[in-house]
Image: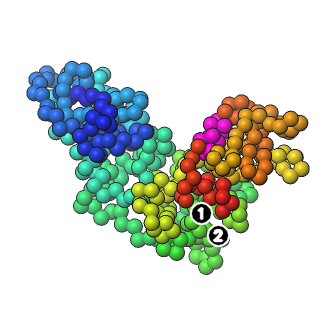
Amino acid sequence: MLEWKRVSSSDSQTPAQGQVSSTCPLDCEALFPSDAPTTTHSCSPKCPLHPSLTRSRFLAFFSPPADPDWASYKLGIFICLNCSGVHRNFPEISRVKSVRLDFWDDSIVEFMTRNGNLCSKAKYEAKVPAFYYIPQSEDCMVLKEQWIRAKYERQEFVASSLTWTFSGNREGLLWKRGRDNGQYLRRKFVLLTREGLLKYYTKEEGKAPKAVISIKDLNATFQTEKIGNPHGLQITYKRDGHTRNLFVYHENGKEIVDWFNAFRAARLHYLKTAFPELPESELLPHITRNYLKQGYMEKTGPKDAFEQGQVFIGNKEHGYEIHDDVPKGVRGNRWKAGITIVTPERRFVFACPNEKEQREWLESLRHVLALPMTPLNPYATAATGQR
């Protein structure tokens, strides 16, 4: 039978074991087998696999919430509650049991003993490309499902696989939301990595693109609730000094995730070209980014009339501050929960629809102010007037 115990990174035996994410990655890959010998223990058939009863080769490197209570007995790995729900959707790939509530035959216990998360990771993640996005527990379902299918069903990353060969270009059709009427129409998209461009066309056979987007300023993030589609992807870019958005989706989950990772590959290629002196490990966090907070606030305009707008903020060491109030005499049209952003040039006054939104915005803005100023920090260029 099996047991796992919690250890700190200082107790780990290898460098890999000490590299633990602050959030639990899909399939709970933070679980690694230890080198400790397994104690022989007889187990009667249909015995619960309770961690307090036995010894084993498994160590848990989990941040809260605690150790996993689930396991895929078909793959021989331990998984957390969130991951177990995804695994249950694919019974042809994975079969899930509760560690504490279900019963375990000797043969299954022996299979779990012979395998484990580190063995699974070594086999199924042998060749994961650096740009490929590995979903975290808070990510949307399509990212989780396609990660599991890519690993275990299609086996795209095993040592012998040639599946993930990225040529640098990609072409296909996506459903794009119209700017004026909100209607989704099929549009042709062409990604040219070496040229650093993304183009889209209103007609499949059209010669002139509707828009040409520089990879330099492109960001892509899944926004399923905002778009109202489980495969919804938001593409953000800069044009004429303004932020623009494209909202797209594809009926096929694999197709939209492949597009997302193609954008990430193109972004990594651009960053390596733009910052050749930086190691790849420093570039990877800046390929794409998820937004800390999205929503609406009222903002004072040039004549103090409240209108929607945008402002870039920088580091607190460069004179930027956040206050949870508004200057005297300033009132919003509808919303009363105020926020003031202080920059070296002026103050920007915002109003939130309620105190809950105000707290969430304050938390996100203060997080941005605490970020260090680096060449790759998207907020650093804003603070120095480059955006």
Quadrant in which the N terminus is drawn: top left
Rendered view: 283 above or below 88? below
What residue is rendered at 62% in x and 58% in y? 381
Q: Residues within 10 Å of mark 2 (few under 14, many from 20)?
A: few
User: Which of 74/215 is in front?
Assistant: 215
> Where is residue 192 drawn, in percent x and y?
51, 72
What residue is rendered at 73% in x and 48% in y? 343
Going from N to C along the chain, the mark reached first, 1 or 2, is 2
> Where is residue 14 drawn, in percent x and y?
25, 44
Type of the residue with mark 1: Asp
Residue 88 visible within the image? no
Type of the residue with mark 2: Ala
Residues in magenta, as a range: 360-369
User: Which of 299/265 is in front?
Assistant: 299
Q: Which mark is residue 217?
A: 1
* Callout 2: SS: strand
Dividing the picture into quarters, in which one does residue 112 lie? Answer: top left
> Where is residue 140 drawn, in percent x and y?
50, 44
Q: Which mark is residue 211?
A: 2
Rendered view: 181 above or below 37? below
* Callout 1: SS: helix
Quadrant in which the C terminus is drawn: bottom right
Disc 1 or disc 2, which is closer to the eye? 1
Q: Is residue 305 left or right of residue 160?
A: right
Dividing the picture into quarters, in which one does residue 244 lie? Answer: bottom right
What residue is rendered at 64% in x and 45% in y? 316
Rendered view: 341 above or below 96? below
Q: Residues within 10 Å of mark 1 (few under 14, many from 20)?
A: few
User: Which of 265/98 is in front?
Assistant: 265
